[in-house]
Every structure is written in structure tokens, then in C-alpha cells.
Image (cartoon, rainbow, N blue to C red):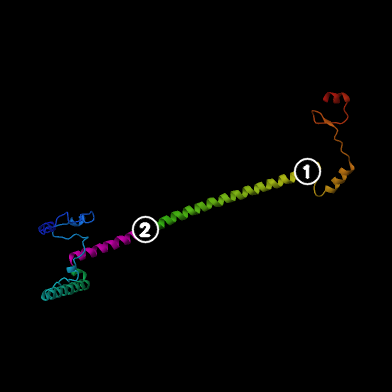
Amino acid sequence: MSIIGKLLKYGVTFDSIECSRQALPVLDFVRWRKPRWVTRAKSKEFVLSKRHEYNTEETEWLRRTENHYRTQMKAIWQLIKLVPDQSLPNDLKKKADKEKIAKASWKEMEERMKDWNEQVAMIREAEQSKMNQQRQNKLLGWLNQEQLISEQFSEETLKRLQREKEAGFITPENVEQKLMESLETTADYEFALDKEGVRVINFDESTEKKQG
């Protein structure tokens, strides 16, 4: 009989129960099971469940058979390790063959890689030597060009110094002489230039009037 049926049997009605929203979810239960939010009953609070009893003979037999199995498996694996390759099972023979094939293929690959590395090294050395020769030729060309430029510059400087000397330019050697000459001579800037660039110092008043 459900909880509601028991309540109705003893004359308890819903009017006598405070059916609030907090108490209503307690009535939402699954049959033959208590809700999770309901606490444990006080009558069962200190009750200990009965310990499960195992059959001693069965447990001893299971432990004994497990020990025998482990011992036999260890012996089999030790025997497999000690026996020669001819007495190995088919799967172990296949595994050994695969390992041998893998080792042979690895060795062959190493030899191929060694040959390929040697070929690449020869090509790289040839390219490096070629690049070094080109760089050396380029540097020699630059040096020759710089040498020619320096020679041309030196020739031009000599010519320029010769022209300056002939033209009477002021130099550290003749600066005192030029100063004395400039102090002794007077400069008259009242002159004109004609179309040909000749200085005209004495010109007529008519030309002054026309220019004015």
C-alpha cells in the first residue's frame, strides 16, 4: 500500500496537512524507492549491513588455479626465450623474419643515404669552389677599378694644382705674399663690362645718362 493510501486509511486528509511548495516534492517518489533528498530513517541510522560470506573452499580453489596459471605462463615464456630459432612457433618466426628484413632494409637505406650524401657533397664542393672563384674575380675587378679611379684622381689633382698655381690661387705657401699685394694695390670697382666681358673703366656721361 502506498503512503497516500496509508494516510487515507488512518483518516488523515490533505486539509490537515500543510501542502506547501516545499513539502510537495517529497510526495513525488518512485515506487519501492525512497527519494534521494530524504534523510535516512532514525531506526536504521546505526544498523550495519550483514557482511557477505564467501565460500572458503571456492576461494582457495580459485587462488590455487590462478597461481598454477601464472607459474605455467612464466615457464612457457622462459622456455620460448631459451629454445633456438628453429623450434619457435610460426608467429615468432614471422616476427623474427620481419625484424631481419627491417634490419636489412635499414642497412640498405643507410648505404643509399651515404652514397647520396657523398654525391651531394661533391656537387656542393664544386659549386662552392665555383662561387669562390667568381667572388675572387669580382673582388679583383673591384680592386683594379679602384686603382684606376685613384690613378685618374691623382692625375686630375696634379692637373688642378698645376692650374691653380698658374692662375695664381691663394695657397698656404703664398698666402703672405698675396696679403701684401692686396694691401699695396688698390681695387677700383667702378667699371662696366661689355658684351665680350671686357672691363670699361672710362666711359662717357652720355652712356651714364642712357643707363640711368
* Name of the residue lying farthest toward the right: 184
Q: Is residue 202 left or right of residue 86?
A: right
Is residue 110 magenta-colored? Answer: yes
Q: Position of residue 139 (x, y in %)?
A: 58, 51
Tell me which secondary structure the magenta stretch mostly adopts. Answer: helix
Is residue 98 magenta-colored? Answer: yes
Q: Is residue 198 above or below residue 167?
A: above
Q: Which mark is residue 164?
A: 1
Q: Using the numbered discs, state the Cα–Cα distance from disc 2 to disc 1 in whole angstroms.
A: 74 Å
Q: Is residue 62 left or right of residue 189?
A: left
User: Which SS class for mark 1?
Assistant: helix
Q: Is residue 46 left or right of residue 184?
A: left
Task: Write down the region rendered in magenta.
Answer: 89-112
Q: Which mark is residue 109?
A: none
**Crowding at label 1, few (<14), some or many (≥20) Cα neighbours within 10 Å?**
few
Name the residue carrying label 2.
113
Please report the residue visible at 23 percent of the width from the left and 63 percent of the height from the top.
97
Please report the residue visible at 88 percent of the width from the left and 44 percent of the height from the top.
183
The quadrant of the rendering that contains the N terminus is bottom left
The quadrant of the rendering that contains the C terminus is top right
Q: In the image shown, does 161 or 185 lie closer to the viewer?
A: 185
Give the amino acid type for the residue marked by disc 1 in the picture: Glu
Q: In the image shown, does 85 or 82 lie closer to the viewer?
A: 82
Q: Position of residue 206 (x, y in %)?
A: 87, 23
Between label 2 and label 1, give the one nearer the viewer. 1
Q: Position of residue 3 (x, y in %)?
A: 13, 58
Visible residue check, residue 137: yes
Please report the residue visible at 69 percent of the width from the left and 46 percent of the height from the top.
153
**Crowding at label 2, few (<14), some or many (≥20) Cα neighbours within 10 Å?**
few
Q: Is residue 103 above or below residue 137?
A: below
